[in-house]
């Protein structure tokens, strides 16, 4: 075996071991930084449900039923929206509003695309959701359980992680001249 081949072989082995070690320890450090929040999960589910019903309203001419849903569950939906705001602020810091807006846009887009793929069956599948929702209690837990039980399409998976804190700047103290 030539010296050059042994050198490359050692370099590849070293790189492979370093990469394996990185991936072996990376999930543990990431898990320590991220935590799953039931409130965040519920907020994403409710945002998905609200968007799904909006797409249904626009596609199936059921705007009056959508408006009834919004009016009936306004306090729950408002609290859920505040939870989503909190998630995006914690996770994305100063980019929170942009990321939140992007999420809402992607959510509506992916759900509209699903509606287009379903064709004429879409309304037959989705309009009965309004009847199911009418049968719910006005409680947050009833609506949250309903949203969780529905397989509502989301644009991507969002984890509940706290955003890294910016480095602490030490303020310089000025000396007063006497």
Image (spheres, helix red, strand yellow):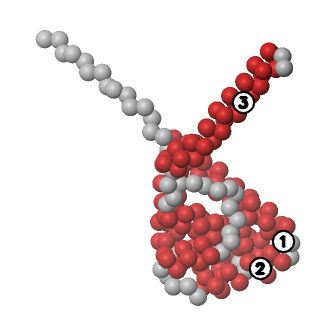
Q: Which of marks 2 and 3 precedes in the sequence?
A: 3
Q: Mark 2 points at which residue?
A: 125
Give coordinates of residue 174: x percent, y percent: 25, 18
Report whether residue 89 is seen.
Answer: no
Q: Which residue of the protein is positioned furthest toward the top in this rendering?
A: 178
Task: Name the residue: 68% across, 80% down.
Answer: 129
The secondary structure type at the circle numbered 3 is helix
Quarter holding the C terminus?
top left
Specify whether 65 is left or right of 118.
Answer: left
Closer to the observer: label 3 or label 2? Answer: 3
Write down the residue under mark 3: 13
Q: Which mark is residue 118?
A: 1
Q: How far apart are marks 1 and 3 (CA)?
A: 50 Å
Side of 161 where 9 appears, left or right: right
Distance from label 3 to label 2 (Cα)? 55 Å
The residue located at (51%, 41%) in the rendering is 94
Question: Residue 61, image x and y in percent?
Answer: 75, 76
The relative height of residue 173 versus residue 90 in the rendered view (above or below) is above
The disc label shown at residue 146, or none: none
């Amino acid at each position: 075996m030539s010296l050059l081949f042994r050198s490359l072989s050692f370099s590849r082995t070293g790189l492979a071991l370093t990469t394996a070690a990185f991936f072996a320890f990376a999930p543990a450090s990431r898990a320590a930084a991220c935590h799953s929040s039931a409130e965040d999960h519920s907020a994403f589910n409710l945002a998905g449900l609200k968007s799904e019903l909006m797409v249904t309203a626009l596609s199936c001419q059921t705007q009056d039923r959508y408006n009834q849903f919004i009016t009936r569950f306004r306090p729950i939906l408002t609290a859920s929206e505040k939870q989503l705001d909190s998630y995006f602020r914690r996770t994305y810091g100063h980019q929170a509003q942009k990321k939140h807006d992007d999420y809402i846009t992607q959510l509506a887009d992916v759900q509209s695309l699903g509606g287009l793929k379903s064709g004429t069956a879409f309304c037959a599948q989705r309009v009965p959701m309004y009847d199911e929702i009418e049968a719910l209690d006005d409680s947050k837990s009833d609506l949250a359980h309903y949203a969780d039980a529905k397989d509502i399409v989301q644009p991507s998976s969002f984890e509940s992680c706290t955003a890294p804190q910016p480095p602490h700047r030490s303020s310089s103290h000025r000396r007063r001249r006497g």
